[in-house]
Image (cartoon, rainbow, N blue to C red):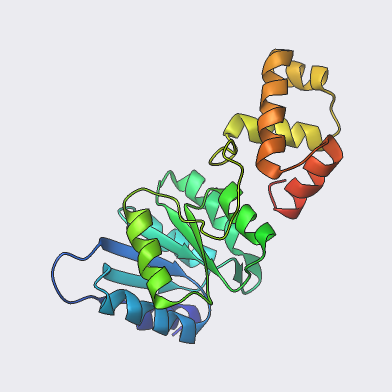
């Protein structure tokens, strides 16, 4: 049996008891011992009816094609040979609006911001305790965000909009505002508004800093 599929098979579990918090959670991670511990807690706390584990983005996409009703994805940032955040682009292509929480051994603010900018509804470091995991699961299951370690300005948007990402890409290509207006068929005022929101989101003070931060976060 393929190693990745073996890990997936080994992690399929059903929780006992009544009324679990979520019906189905997909964990995307390639560390077997961590998967075993995480699955055990989810079961013991009666948080999930069914837990499925896969070790790659490709396996996650395959699983989601068959189970689009998945309640939540728990995603590692760094998988073997690929970036975990690449799953967000795949989700967009599948048209499957499953919320994602990043669970990672990387706890720096840049990684947390990258997860948030990509569209994750939460971020939990692997060093977090059981109580934090339970609190995260309960919060995101009720439709709330979970970013306890990230200090963000009150005016920061939840994530960049598709239009703001388009403006950001053109900004990174060195286009001036007037040219961005022409390419996107927007007024100059609208472009300036988008740029202001992008700068605030990335905590940047000028165009150069904005592009550098966006690249560091993997947005462009």
Which residue appears at 64% of the width and 32% of the height? 164
Which residue appears at 60% of the width and 52% of the height? 151
- Tell whether 110 sits left or right of 11: right
Quarter of the image containing the N terminus? bottom left
Seen in the picture, residue 83 relative to 90 is either above or below; the reply is below
Residue 208 position in % (x across, y down): 86, 40
Quarter of the image containing the C terminus? top right
Residue 138 position in % (x across, y down): 32, 60
Residue 117 position in % (x across, y down): 60, 47
Which residue appears at 32% of the width and 55% of the height? 141
Is residue 13 in view from this perspective?
Answer: no
Seen in the picture, residue 8 relative to 205 is either above or below; the reply is below
- Tell whether 12 sits left or right of 170: left
Seen in the picture, residue 162 relative to 68 is either above or below; the reply is above
Residue 179 position in % (x across, y down): 81, 20
Seen in the picture, residue 33 relative to 190 is either above or below; the reply is below
Return the residue nearer the eye: 50 or 116: 116
Is residue 174 in view from this perspective?
Answer: yes
Numbered label tally: 0
Residue at the extreme left of the image, as rendered: 18
Which residue appears at 66% of the width and 60% of the height? 109
- Tell whether 200 sits left or right of 147: right
């Amino acid at each position: 049996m393929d190693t990745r599929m073996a890990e997936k098979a080994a992690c399929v579990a059903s929780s006992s008891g009544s009324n679990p918090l979520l019906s189905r959670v997909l964990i995307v991670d390639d560390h077997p011992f961590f998967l075993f511990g995480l699955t055990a807690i989810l079961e013991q706390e009666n948080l999930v009816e069914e837990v499925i584990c896969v070790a790659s983005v490709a396996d996650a996409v395959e699983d989601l094609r068959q189970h689009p009703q998945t309640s939540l994805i728990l995603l590692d940032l760094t998988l073997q040979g690929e970036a975990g955040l690449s799953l967000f682009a795949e989700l967009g292509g599948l048209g499957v609006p499953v919320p994602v929480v990043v669970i990672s051994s990387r706890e720096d603010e840049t990684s947390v911001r990258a997860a948030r900018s990509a569209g994750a509804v939460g971020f939990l470091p692997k060093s977090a305790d059981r109580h934090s995991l339970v609190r995260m699961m309960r919060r995101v299951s009720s439709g709330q965000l979970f970013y306890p370690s990230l200090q963000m300005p009150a005016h920061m948007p939840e994530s960049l909009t598709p239009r703001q990402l388009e403006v950001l890409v053109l900004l990174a290509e060195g286009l001036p505002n007037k040219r961005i207006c022409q390419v996107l068929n927007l007024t100059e005022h609208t472009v300036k508004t988008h740029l202001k929101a992008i700068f605030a989101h990335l905590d940047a003070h000028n165009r150069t800093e904005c592009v550098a931060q966006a690249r560091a976060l993997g947005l462009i």
